[in-house]
């Protein structure tokens, strides 16, 4: 009996720890994210927006919904913006599948795009959970 | 007496298995039939059904570029089932298909590889993949099955998108086509049904910065134009793989042929999202759903696409 109690206690503790230490975002939490507020450069500055981009893109990657535009992932926008800040550069060179292109954007633009992409990936994930059946013939899709 | 009991028990067991197996396909069959019905209605007469299906298409497009009365079996040709202008170039290319020598390469690789011959003694199996492996509790695609066979024999895994993998799949598809076999995807357990449902949800869920689902283009968007291309329909989308794409083969013929995983990776990337890993659970379950939607159609791969 003691053994059973100790097993239950250990399991409970393990679950509590894993639950507390888990930083994962639930669908309900994703749904509440406000991209315009979170990625507002005037309110949070480039550093703040970039920090949010990093935070939310980690969740997007965890849920395998990270955005990629013209061969450049959100992670690459973040890395590019961080490097530009470190090296005091005003621009972030754009890449296409890790290869450099001739184009570049300002650091603030890169930070905000990364943030918007990171947050939108999550809100879209939450939205998709509610809307996908609307496209299924024989289900909610009417024609 | 004993023999009779044994026979009856076996019969009851088999019937029970079959009933259970069919129970897991109820929703999938409902989905497939509804999709086929929608696709047939859409391509019955595009011009007459403009308001229902093609509100933004031009008169010229509907009258001169979308075939009328497309039959179920024709959908295995992808968008060439209805795309009149595309059919001209398709038929020209099919006179001397660029993938023929690659299929021969696939056959040669198979003939020289004892492990492959042992794993796939029957080469007419292209329509039976993906399937759900009850032991592993996961979807097995032809690509993952070939690579498992190869690595078990001590060889390094092949590229899952092109090269030897696509050549051998081309040979399997060609053999299956010659044997007149059809797509025959099975859902025989609750776990398999769950995998199918996840694949279905993936297909219909909007994703990426462009907020597109696979269905946006290939269900609701099928038949519509994107620049000079007519979007293909989900019904029959997996029957003709591996495909030789003119785009892929621009630099070398060998690079021109690719697996379904290669194509789907590109599609997900086009939605504005980081592409799916070719061997990921999401990819396998997506292909499982897509292949089920083509059940009953002729396997007609490899084929050629733009």
Image (spheres, coloured by chain):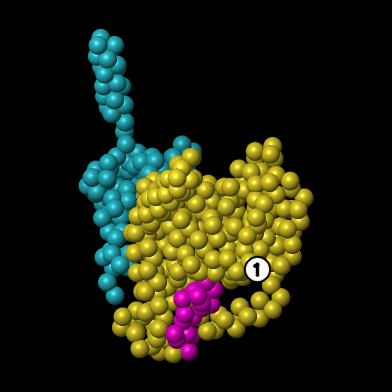
Q: Which chain is yellow?
A: B
Left/right placement of residue A53 relative to residue B90 reads left
Vertical relation: A86 (above or below) A14: below
Q: Quadrant of the N terminus of chain A?
A: top left
Q: Helix or strand or loop: what does disc 1 sit on? A: helix
Residue B2 magenta:
no
Residue linked to disc 1: B178
Residue B162: % across, % down: 64, 55
Q: Colour of chain A?
A: cyan
Residue B73 in the image, given as x and y percentages of width and height: 50, 75
Residue drawn where x is 41% and y is 62% of the image: B214
Apparent side of residue B58 relative to residue B89 in the rendered image (left or right): left
- Quadrant of the snapshot with the C terminus of chain A: bottom left
The front one of B187 and A110 is B187
The magenta stretch is B64-82
Q: How many numbered circles does the render carry?
A: 1
Local crowd size for mark 1, using a 10 Å CA cut-off: few (<14), some (14–19), many (≥20)? few
Residue at the far front: name it: B1
Q: Nearer the viewer, residue B236 or B210?
A: B236
Letter of the chain that mark 1 sits on in the rendering? B
Residue B267 percent across, percent down from the top left? 48, 60
Residue B75 in magenta? yes
- Image: B87 above or below B138: below
Q: Residue at x 70, y 69 (%)?
A: B98
Q: Nearer the viewer, residue B15 or A57?
A: B15
Residue found 51% across the figure and 80% down from its top: B83
Does residue B99 appear anywhere in the picture?
Answer: yes
């Amino acid at each position: 009996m003691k053994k059973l109690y100790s097993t239950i206690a250990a399991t409970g503790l393990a679950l509590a720890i894993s639950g507390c230490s888990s930083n994962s975002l639930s669908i309900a939490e994703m749904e509440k994210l406000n991209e315009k507020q979170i990625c507002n450069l005037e309110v949070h500055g480039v550093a703040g927006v970039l920090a949010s981009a990093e935070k939310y893109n980690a969740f997007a990657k965890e849920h395998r919904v990270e955005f990629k535009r013209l061969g450049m992932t959100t992670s690459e926008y973040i890395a590019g913006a961080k490097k530009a800040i470190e090296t005091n550069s005003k621009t972030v060179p754009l890449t296409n599948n890790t290869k450099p292109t001739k184009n570049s954007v300002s650091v603030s633009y890169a930070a905000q795009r990364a943030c918007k992409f990171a947050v939108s990936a999550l809100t879209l994930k939450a939205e998709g959970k509610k809307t996908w059946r609307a496209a299924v013939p024989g289900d909610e899709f009417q024609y | 007496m004993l023999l009779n009991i044994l026979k009856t028990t076996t019969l009851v067991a088999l019937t029970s298995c079959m009933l259970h197996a069919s129970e897991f396909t109820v929703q999938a069959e409902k989905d497939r039939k509804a999709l086929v019905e929608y696709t047939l209605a859409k391509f019955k007469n595009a011009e007459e059904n403009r308001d229902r299906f093609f509100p933004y298409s031009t008169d010229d497009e509907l009258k001169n570029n979308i075939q009328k009365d497309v039959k179920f079996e024709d959908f295995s040709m992808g968008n060439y089932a209805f795309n009149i202008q595309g059919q001209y170039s398709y038929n020209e290319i099919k006179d001397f298909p660029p993938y023929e020598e690659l299929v021969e390469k696939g056959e040669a690789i198979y003939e020289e590889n004892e492990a492959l011959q042992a794993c796939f003694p029957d080469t007419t199996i292209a329509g039976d993949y993906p399937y759900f492996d009850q032991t592993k509790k996961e979807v097995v695609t032809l690509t993952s099955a070939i690579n498992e066979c190869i690595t078990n024999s001590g060889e390094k895994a092949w590229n899952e998108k092109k090269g030897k993998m696509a050549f051998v799949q081309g040979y399997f598809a060609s053999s299956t086509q010659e044997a007149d076999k059809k797509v025959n995807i099975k859902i025989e357990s609750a776990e398999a049904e769950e995998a199918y449902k996840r694949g279905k949800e993936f297909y219909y869920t909007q994703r990426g910065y462009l907020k597109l689902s696979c269905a946006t283009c290939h269900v609701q968007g099928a038949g519509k134009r994107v620049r000079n291309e007519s979007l293909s329909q989900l019904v029959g989308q997996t029957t003709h793989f591996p495909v030789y794409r003119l785009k892929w083969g621009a630099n070398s013929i060998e690079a021109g042929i690719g697996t379904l995983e290669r194509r789907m990776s590109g599609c997900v990337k086009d939605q504005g999202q980081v592409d799916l890993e070719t061997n990921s659970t999401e990819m396998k379950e997506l292909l499982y759903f897509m292949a089920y939607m083509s059940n009953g159609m002729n396997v007609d791969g490899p084929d050629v696409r733009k």
